[in-house]
Every structure is written in structure tokens, then in C-alpha cells.
Amino acid sequence: MEILPREVIIWLLFTVVVSIIPLIFDYCAKIITTQQRPKSKDFLCDGQLLLISVAFGAESMGNVLFTGKLYETWQIIIIGACFLTTLCAGILYPFIVNTRQNSTMKDPEFVVRITVILFLCSLGTSLVCKWLSSQVSSN
């Protein structure tokens, strides 16, 4: 019995890891250009993680819904949680970008915390949705 199906491992490697590569390069570029390590409030409060969260959620929910299977209650709750995290990330992104551009962001540390929490929730619910869709395809 395999813990993570092949489809989930491929998703983790090629969707999750590859989508974070631009952030890693951005971080390195900031170090090179400024000669110092950027603070999290200066680096993560641009909303990039929210865009990645929307992509995770949309892709994994699409896979789950494409199967057409009738799911159990706990599975529907997970799919609903994935939808909510995707929706929240999509709604929050323009607010963060606009407040950042207008220099009206009052608490950048709070924005970073919310962004990271929402990203991790999105990653978790998307991972479970991807696992659900892979279970249907393997049966």
C-alpha cells in the first residue's frame, strides 16, 4: 500500500516546488542587489504566495470535480475547505496589492502571517484534493 500515489508525488514536485522557484530567485536577487537579507515583511507582503495558493486550489479542485465521483461527507468538507482557501486567497490578493502600492498598509507583519497561514492551508487542502482525485483514477 503506497502512502502517496504517483500523481500526488508528481504534483508535489512539479506544481508545488516549481511554482515556488520564482520566489526563491526573487529572494536571491534581493540579496544580491541590496547586499542584505530581506525582511519577511518586505519580501512576503506582496501577495505572491496568494497567487500560488489560487493556482494550487484551482488545479486540485478541477481534478477532483473532473472525476465526477460522489464523495463522502468528510471529502466534501475537504473540497469545500479547498474552495474557501482558494476564494480567500483570490479575494485577499488585490487588497494586499492595492494597499502596498498606495503605501497604506498598516501592519505588514500581520499581512505576512495571514498570507503564510492561507498558503499553508491552501497547500494542505489542495494536497488532500489531489490525493482524492488520484484515488478515483487508481480505482
Image (tube, rainbow, N blue to C red):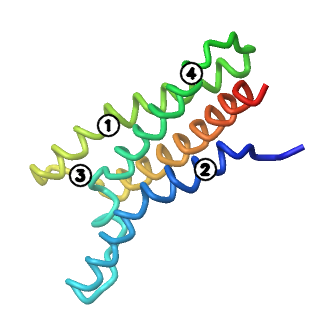
Instruction: Tell me the kind of residue under disc 3.
Output: Lys
Identify the residue shown where x is 39% and y is 69%.
Answer: 24
Q: CA distance from mark 4 to mark 1?
A: 18 Å
Farthest residue to the top: give it: 70
Instruction: Name the residue tied to disc 4.
Output: 80
* Quarter-of-image position of residue 112: bottom left
Residue 106: which numbered mark, if any? Answer: 3
Please tell me which of labels 4 and 2 falls first in the chain.
2
Q: CA distance from mark 1 to mark 3?
A: 15 Å
Farthest residue to the left: give it: 102
Residue 10: which numbered mark, if any? Answer: 2
Q: CA distance from mark 4 to mark 3?
A: 31 Å
Camera-side residue of 109 and 1:
1
Instruction: Tell me the kind of residue under disc 2.
Output: Ile
Instruction: Tell me the kind of residue under disc 1.
Output: Leu
Identify the residue shown where x is 49% and y is 49%.
Answer: 15
Up-down: is 137 above or below 73?
below
Mark whose residue sits in front, 4 or 2: 2
Q: Residues within 10 Å of mark 3 (few under 14, many from 20)?
A: few
Position in image of residue 38 (x %, y %):
31, 76
